[in-house]
Image (cartoon, rainbow, N blue to C red):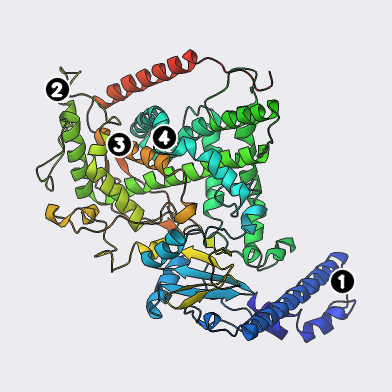
Amino acid sequence: MMNFFMGDFGIGPSSDMATSNSSATGATGAPTTGFQSIQQSVDTVAGIAIGLFIAYSAYKNLSEAYRRGDPYRKAPLPPSPPGDFLLGHYRHVPEDESFRKYSEWSKKYNSDVLYFETLGTKWVVLNSYEAAHELLDVRGRKYSDRPRFVMFEEMGWAPTLTWLRWGPQWGLHRKVLSPPLTKIGCVYFQTLQRKQAMIMCKNLIENPKEWMSAVTHFAVAIIMKIAYGIDVDTPTDEWVKLAAEASEAVGKAGAPASSIMDRIPWTRHLPDWLPFMERLKYAHENKKAIQDITERPFNESMSDYPIRKLKECFVHRMHYLRGEDARRNRQNVYYEEDIKGGAATMLIAGNDTTASTVNLIILYLVKHPRVQRRAQAEVDYILLTTGVPTEPVEDYRPTTPAPWAASSSNRAGTIRLPTWEDIPKFKYVNLILQEVYRINPLSPLGIPHASVKDSNDIDPDGDDTYNGMRIPCGTIVYPNVWAMNRDEKRYREPERFFPERYLPKEEGGWGEPFPVGNFGFGRRVCVGQHLAENSLLIAMAMMLATMEFDLPIGPDGNLKDFEPEFSHKGQSIVLPFKVSIKPRSPMVDELLDRHILVAKMAEKAAEDGKQARPSPSA
């Protein structure tokens, strides 16, 4: 690819190639086929087009630099590594683990803000919490936009809150998604989340070899019910497979807004077999997975609307409100595509965040048995009492059966599973979750923002300054969450997994701040944060109460340690690994069965007791 660009400044093939290809025959004298002629023509046209665009970009940048003469606009750009003539930094930023390279450059140039440019596309990377907080939180209005995600457009995404540009449509999506996902609104879903957490534990114990499928089922079952009103009964359900395929397609699509199509939008029209269009080919190959997850659950949910009573789900609720607007002759400001996009956002984001994080939690419990023992001690104490552990539990060894299951005669007292009233008491369990967030953020580079012109701008062109550095208007802004949460100024021994680091010093901790950026910054913070964290906390508490996680057993019968492998193509996810799972008590199966049955009966009674609302078309 680079030979193509650098030869004759990227304008078509070399002169030797042009001479040989101008002949109607090949090297052997045989006539060229029609396909070869077409392919040569496409290559030539593509080369000329790219060359013209490079020339235009160079002219535009040089003229812009020339005309900027006032003192404000002479503020220097942030530091950046050397780039190539015209191409800038295109070939210098690695596609895999670019967050590590950005962090290295940040240390090398002693700057928490770095600047990059390729063919007129400008982007900066924020490598410290201070920079991200000042620009994305404090100046949130200025940096509330998103770049255009051409790669995801090619993958077939409907309008979704995550990718939408700043404007009325974004405001509409935020407005309709926010109310049910507030901290108070999420209380409504807690019964569902607790039931699914118990079902997950049951599946983990019954089929530990397929433990990742059980975790994915847990995440998908919650979101499918909330978004579409669809019940997902087992880990082998088609909806689990569908969601897993879509999540994998998104997770391996690369960092958002980093492909050649995102940098140069018109390249989306080039053939995907060209050597530098691998990402376009990937988008086309995975388009069906995205279309399926957008269309199929939506169509399934709407198949009985409004024949029977409305389901308590996002899709039916939004269609009902849309119908009410039509009946009352109110202007309909959102469309079916908006409803599809909103529901798909909930499904993909909810599944990715929940399932991937639970996988990481299990990994770190296995690799750090001391942490697992301390968390189990806390859970055991609270399930046996109404208080919080006050004695040190560093050397705690859980008994078998677990303390809460020791007295089978007192079923109304000590034998129980974690409830939502217990969750705020699980302080150490929450510290484990925060440490998982810190050491392995799912989106190491976050979701990029983009700067926009604002009424408060001093500069007429909308440029901004930070610590004496100029950030041009329209610049894409990446928050390097991975670097922020490994900042040695904020975290001692940043590579160490140590949940106690967040405890106050008087309690034996290091008094360090919670990690940042896992759910975004400023006005683009994820609206599903409270729902996701509720799912994670109840899942952790239920797993710690009912089972133990250990290293896999090798062929010789001994525990076998391993080094986990990760994929960093866009999202940072742990690849499948083996784990030993066993119940903490022989009573666990019976306890889970009983509580799952009670939860299902209560759920059915609640649904049967609801009166059908009038049809919006009535």
What residue would you read off at disc 3? 543
Gap in Å between the C-alphas at discs 1 and 4?
66 Å
Gap in Å between the C-alphas at discs 2 and 1?
85 Å
320 and 373: which one is in front? Answer: 320
The answer to the question of whether label 1 and label 4 lie on touching residues, with beta carbons closer than 8 A, is no
What residue would you read off at disc 4? 186
Q: Is residue 578 left or right of residue 496?
A: right
460 and 421: which one is in front? Answer: 460
Looking at the rendered structure, the kind of residue marked 2 is Ser
* Front disc: 4 or 3: 4
Where residue 361 appears, x then y in whole percent? 33, 47
The answer to the question of whether label 3 and label 1 lie on touching residues, with beta carbons closer than 8 A, is no
Report the disc number at residue 407: 2
For residue 123, which quarter of the picture? bottom right
| Label 4 SS | helix
Where residue 290 appears, x then y in whole percent? 61, 45
| Label 2 SS | loop
Give whichever of discs 2 and 3 has the lower sequence position.
2
Give whichever of discs 4 and 3 has the lower sequence position.
4
Q: Residues within 10 Å of mark 2 (few under 14, many from 20)?
A: few
